[in-house]
Each structure stands twice: as C-alpha cells, then as structure tokens.
Image (spheres, helix red, strand yellow):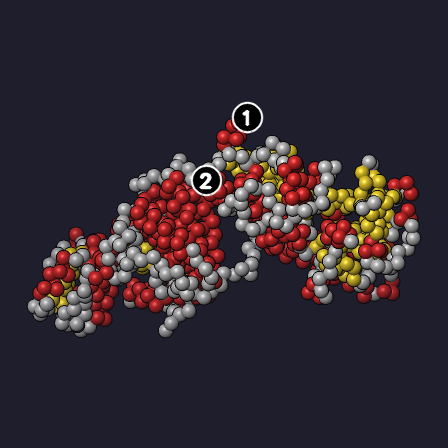
Amino acid sequence: MATILAVDDSTSMRQMLAFTLQHAGHEVHEAGDGQAALDLAKTTSMDLVISDVNMPVMDGITLVKSLRALAEFRFTPILLLTTEASPEKKMEGKTAGATGWIVKPFNPEQLLATVQRVLG
Amino acid sequence: MSLDVSQFVGVFLEESFEGLDIMEAGLIDFREDDPEAVNVIFRAAHSIKGGAGTFGFREVSDFTHGAETLLDQIRQGERRMNTETGDTLLAAVDCIRELLRASSEGGDLDTEKVVSTRTAIEQMLGKTPDGASAEAAATPVVNAGWQISFKPRPELMKTGNDPLRLLAELQRLGPAKASVDASRLPALGEMDPEACYLDWNVELSAPVAEAEVRGVFEWVEDECELSVTPLAPAADEAKKSAAATPPAGGPAGGNGDGKPPAAKNGATGESGKRPDGGSIRVAVEKVDSLVNLVGELVITQSMLTQMGNDPGDFDLLRLEQLREGLGQLERQTRELQEGVMGIRMLPISFIFSRFPRVVRDMAGALGKSVDLRMEGEDTELDKGLIEKLADPLTHLVRNAIDHGVESTEQRIAAGKPPAGQISLKAYHQGGNIVVEVADDGAGLDRAKLLAKAESQGMAVSDTMSDREVWSLIFAAGFSTATKVTDISGRGVGMDVVRRNIEAVNGRVEIESSYGEGTRIILRLPLTLAILDGMSVRVGDETYILPMTAILESIQPKTEQLSSIAGKGRVVHLRGDYLPLMALHEAFNIDARAQRAEDGIVIVVATSDGRAALLVDELVAQHQVVIKSLETNYRKVPGVSGATIMGDGKVALILDVDMLLRLRRMH
C-alpha cells in the first residue's frame, strides 16, 4: 500500500487522518506543521501528501511550493485540506502546485474515496 | 465500511477548548502592530471549524464559520479590529465554548446569546440573516450521456495530476469510449517529457449528473479546456441553466438557511464527554526526571539487598555503608515524592488567564475603568487546588471591581488615578502558596460594617480589632452593598469563598484601609495529597496540626493563664489575650499534663485571628499523606482527615479553624 504524509497542526485531525489511512492499509507519517513535513519529506519518500493549509511555522501553501522544489516530489500528488470558505485558497494551492483538495469537513469514507482517486 | 472516529472527539474537544483560550487571550490583548497575533486567532478558529465539522459538531462548525470569516477579513486587512469587532468575537468565543460544551455534555445553552451573536456577526459581514439560499439553485441536470472534450495544458502533470487517472475516473461513472487527439504533439527534439500534449474526447454513456462529470475534473479546471455536452439533445432548458451555473457549486449544502442553531443539546454532536480532569498534560522533562529517579532507586535497592544477603560478615564498616544507603534511599524517596507531586502541579495561569476577560467585561458593564496586573502566573499548584480555587478567586475579583473600585468620578474626587488597579499575585511563602487579590478602591468601612452586623443581630462591639470587624463579611448573607448588583450579587458570598478555601486547608485573610483599598490573601497548602504537619501528643493520642496554621509554641507560665468572662480561658501573650483551647477537653481524653503549665501552648493562625491550643508535647514535624476520613469513616467536625504514622497508628489531622469555631459555639 501507499506511504502517505499527513500534515495538520490539529492533533485530532492528524489522528483521524492517520487512523483512517492506516485502517485502509497505508503507511502514515505525521507532521504538525509545514516545516516538520518538509524535514520528513527530505528523508522519506512519499506516495501522497495530505496537508492542512493554515498551520503555524510553515503553512500548507509554502509546503507545497517547497515540496515541488524537491526532485523527489515533483510529481507526487499533494492534497490540501481546505474549507468551503476559501475558493481562492484552492486556487492559491493549485498555483503553488497542489494536485487537488479535500474539502473540510469530511468523513473517513470521503477521505478514502479521494485518496483512492489520486492513488488510482 | 464505516470507520468510527468518535475516539478522537476527546482530543478534538481538548484542543478546541485550548484554541478558544488562545482566541480569547489574543482578542483581549489585540495589537494591530503584530500581524502574527490575528493569524494565531484565525488559525484557532479555523481548526475548530474544520474539526467540528469532521467530528460531527455541525452547529459549532456553522457558528464558527462566521467568526472565522470575520477574522479572515481582519487578517487580510479588509477590516479593522475595533472594540465592537473585538466584543463580538469574544462573545463568539463564549458561544462556541458553550455550543461545544452543550453538544458534548448536554445541559443548558444560552440560545439567546448564540442567536444574537450570530446575528451581530452576520450583520458585520453585511449579510442579511436570511441570506441567499443558493441551495435550490442547481437542480441536478441528468442526461443519458455526455460528450466530453478534455484538452489539458502542457503543465497539468506538474501539480501531480495525471490525465490517465482522470480518464479512469470517468470510466468508473459508466461505459466510456475515448479517442485521443495527438495533433499538438511536437517533434521529438522539442518535446518536454514532463509536459502533456494530448487531448481527449470521451463519450460517456451513463445517466449521471453533469456536476458529477465535471467533478472528475474539479482539480484541473484551471489547467485544461473542458466542455461537457449532452450526448442526446434532451432537457434543453435545464442544460442552459446548468451551463450558466458554474460547476464550482460543488457539493450542495453549506449553511444557507441562516437559521440559528437549534437550542436543544442533542445537536449532531458526538456523545463523547469532555475528559473532565481525566487527563493531565505533563512536560516530558518531568517524566524523564521521574524515570531517572526510579532508576537510581533501583540501584539503591539492589545495594541494600546485597548488604542484607550475607549477614555473616556484617561489621562496622558495613554499618557505615548501610547508613549511607539508607540516607540515599531517603533522599531519593523525597525527590520521587516531590517529582510525583509535581506531575499534579499546574501553573496558576490556568486560572489567572481568565481574568483579563472578566475584568474587561465587568468593568465595561459597570462603566468603570480598571487595570489588571498579574504577577507570579508561573507559580505552580496542585491541579485539584486549581479547580477549587477558580470560583472563589473569580468571586473575589468580581467583588473587587464591583464593590472595591469606585466610580471614575469618585476616584478623581478622591485624588486617585481615574483607572482602578486590581492586582492578582501568586507566590510561595513558607511552604504555602499565597494568592492575593488587591484593589486600590474604597476599602472596607469599619463603621458601616459594624452597623450592618448589629442590624443583623450579630454580637459586635466597638472594641473589636479591625481584623475581627473585617471577618464579619464572612458571615452568611452579609452584604454591605446598598443594592445587590447583577454582577457580583449572585448569591455567592464571602462565606462561600471562605468555606471553599478552608475545605482545602487554606485560609483567608483580609487587609484593608479605608480609602486606600482592600487586599484579600488566600493561603493555600502546596498540594492536597500531602500535608506538612506537626505531630502533637495529647494523652496517648497523636494529632497532626497543619504547619501552615502554627505560628509559635510556648511553655506557658502560670501568670500567662487566666479566664475572662464570656471568653473562657485565655493565654496572655505579649499584650494580647488569645483564646485557649485544651485539646484533651475538646476530644474528651485524659491528658498527661494535669495543669496547663506542664503542657505546651501552640499559637495558631486562623481565619478569625490568632488562638492557642494546649497539648502535652510536640513530637515531630513530618509530611503526612492525607486520607479522607469521610470516605473511610464519616465527617467529624474539627477534623479534616487522618493519616497513618510510621508506627502504623492512625492520627487525626486537625482543622484548626473549625475546632476554634466549635469552641466559640459552646
């Protein structure tokens, strides 16, 4: 199964992501902000990155840009967790190089369906 | 498959309440010159909203949405933070907290406040409460099939998207036939292997909604040219309207109905309870040092075991080693005890942090101007104490603002700065934690207190010391306020404050000078589980007196002892007459010392002033573990608990305040 990096500053969201993805058989790495995620990405290759947008230290948009600058992550799918409130955020994310987004709130089934979409 | 994520609700609630505290503190201290400040507040709101939706707290997420939008506008510089916005956002924080609490624990909800706050936010956002209900807009256009033309831009793959994945997804909707158009393909030499040059035409013969088809391309809308046309010319009317509607409408829903959240607590929330005191966050260093200590303890233990294993050649040299080992054991036990107790210690900022808000709200409501100063927020005290201290302290602060600090006019007339000062202080003093609430207001009025007490039928006299007069306010139902204000006069009086503090072996003292202000001093034990005590002997019994109560002990001389009519036996000490209570009489046992002169008099501090206890002898000072008498036996007036001594005997821990109050009653 796939190796997935879950990035969110909210512990409950991160735990929920990890729990759901692990349940589907994926290997999950967790990070609490963009910088931590980037550090992790430099040492571990991922099949998919799922990241929150608003985070302390380094936000999701900057994370996407930084990941795309790494050779290893040029084509890796990156999904942003966004809220319906910010259509412009979605576009900002796309411009930065994100593959797509998952709209919050979502339930485990929706998450897995989206992940399935990306991983094929 | 249905995955149960309710196990994360507890964590979500915990971090949401933390987030709300962060929002509150940030809003109170808001400074426009600090751009990160609003970001922090916004992020907290954003996380709460996202999590609330995910974990089933629909009302919370709907409500938070408005506050988040407001914060986002401030963050983007589209809106300025002013008092009105600040107040509304603070009210929103309250509402979110209440909504979370109500939907997780049940209980009443101040629906009115939720509705009015919601309306206020919506008005600020320029929305009519009955805003556009876009919901009905797009009736899904269903067709027998769709002709899809998909022309990706060359850079499509650089965002991690893959045309083949999109085609595969289309195929999942139903039978699809795809043809590829490779006319854009450049010569091999000019080709960028990372770019996409192919266009596709897909015939999807499945009766699905147009939105569903477009949904497949949701993420790449801006990276391709896409047209979706019906295969058969059906439902023309609907098609036009659908084409006019941008597909970005996405999943219908949102909260267009503009209705306030229902007041019922049932809500959609999970039934997960907020772990009320169920867990403690402990700094990793604290845990590490405990692990270290346990390691050392194990080493000491094995050293002592080794020594005991071959008693054959036990000589004086070994005795020295044994002593050393025991000394080590003692030190480590003490450190371990302190370390373990430390786990339960939390900084008092847990309570203090609520006061800027309390002061702001209350001063605003009373039209007073009040500055709050806090010192010693890092002072740590037992978690149990923190919980017990919160209400009394809030009451004292409210009192100080309401009854202590005068109105601005009065203050100016009295030559004081127009803004009242309230200061909260916490510090260590001789094995106690001291918490002070001081104001620079009017101070207590001796004459008024005496008159009021007299009118209530209490025994008073003009010769009473200031301290005795001040403690009149602790009497149940005693209030000097000419009228009960809505704010502090909520039926919780100073008597309750004192009872709560004494219930945790603490003490309340008042210092006041008329016209200059009042200072209420709470003296609290460091922890609830262990007591620094002095063991005293009375006859064959041993009792424990809390060290916090003991001022000094003396061997009384005959001329110091006398009886005063109405006051009973007293000890004359440096000009003062202190009421004397013989413990053997109180507990009805035989004392060894038949005459008071043969015993020891311990001078103790109580909330009602100094007093003296007569015992046979002082034994030793120890730290004792407090066992509840109530759980193991029943409540005994004058006794706050019991402990087991080194020799296995049970000793009662005395509640000095209560004992002396009992004496006065008899």
**Res. B264 image quadrant:** bottom left
The correct choice, above or below, for B142 with respect to B465 in the image is below
Residue drawn at 88 percent across, 41 percent down: B560
Residue located 80% across and 46% down the image = B567
Circles 1 and 2, Cβ within 8 Å, touching? The answer is no
Residue extending furthest left? Answer: B233
Q: Position of residue B632 (x, y in %)?
A: 71, 66
Q: Pinpoint residue B470: horizontal percent, then vertical percent.
A: 67, 41
Location of residue B230 with respect to B489 vertically, above or below: below
The disc numbered 2 marks a residue on which chain? B
* B16 w.r.t. B84: above or below: below
Q: Position of residue B613 (x, y in %)?
A: 81, 49
Q: Answer with the quarter of the image where residue B58 lies.
A: bottom left
| The N terminus of chain B, quarter of image | bottom left
Q: Amino acid at mark 2?
A: Gly
Residue B71 location, x and y as percent? 35, 46
Asked whether the viewer can see residue B393, the reply is yes
Q: Please, what is the three-letter code of the amino acid marked with disc 1?
A: Gly
**SS state under label 2:** helix
Residue B1 horizontal side relative to residue A90, left or right: right
Describe the element under mark 1 as helix, strand or loop: loop
> Total marks drawn?
2
Say which residue label 1 marks: B415
Instruction: Indicate left or right for B314 with B664 as reference.
Output: right
Please give the residue where the numbered disc 2 appears in the rendered image: B364
Q: Residues within 10 Å of mark 2 (few under 14, many from 20)?
A: few
